[in-house]
Image: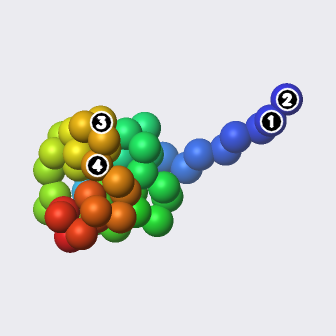
Amino acid sequence: MELVIERPCRSEDERVLSWRFHALKEAGYNSIAALALAKSDVDHHAAANLLAGGCPHDTALRILL
């Protein structure tokens, strides 16, 4: 059994960043790309749709960033 300890987010900005990061990870981005996209103004739905449509990760990142 794995013990997971999470600290509560301190601010609304941190909660939004965390949510965006996890949504982008679920969409298929690796941790580094998901964090970069989460910190940007990129629409996370557009980012997810690119991968869902078959766009390669590197190409999606070039388009979005």
Residue type (three-letter) at the residue carrying disc 4:
Cys
Q: Can residue 62 be seen in this view?
A: yes
Coloring scheme used:
rainbow
From the image, state whether disc 2 or disc 4 is nearer to you: 4
Q: Residue 44: percent from the left, percent from the top?
A: 21, 47
- Where, by quadrant of the figure, is residue 51 drawn? top left
Mark 1 closeness class: few <14, some 14–19, many ≥20 residues within 10 Å: few
From the image, state whether disc 2 or disc 3 is nearer to you: 3
Q: Residue 33: percent from the left, percent from the top?
A: 40, 63
Q: Are marks 1 and 2 in contact (CB under 8 Å)?
A: yes
From the image, state whether disc 3 or disc 1 is nearer to you: 3
Instruction: Name the residue carrying label 4.
Output: 55
Marks 1/2: CA–CA distance: 4 Å
Instruction: Name the residue carrying label 1.
Output: 2
Residue 1 badge: 2
Q: Which residue lies furthest to the top in this view?
A: 1
Tag 3 secondary structure: helix
Instruction: Name the residue carrying label 3.
Output: 52
Left or right: where does residue 35 sit relative to residue 13? right
- Count of numbered labels shown in the rendering: 4
Closer to the camera in the image, 40 or 61: 61
Q: Are marks 2 and 4 in contact (CB under 8 Å)?
A: no
Tag 1 secondary structure: loop
Q: For the point 26% across and 58% down, which residue is it?
A: 60
Q: For the point 42% across and 51% down, which residue is it?
A: 29
- Where, by quadrant of the figure, is residue 54 drawn? top left
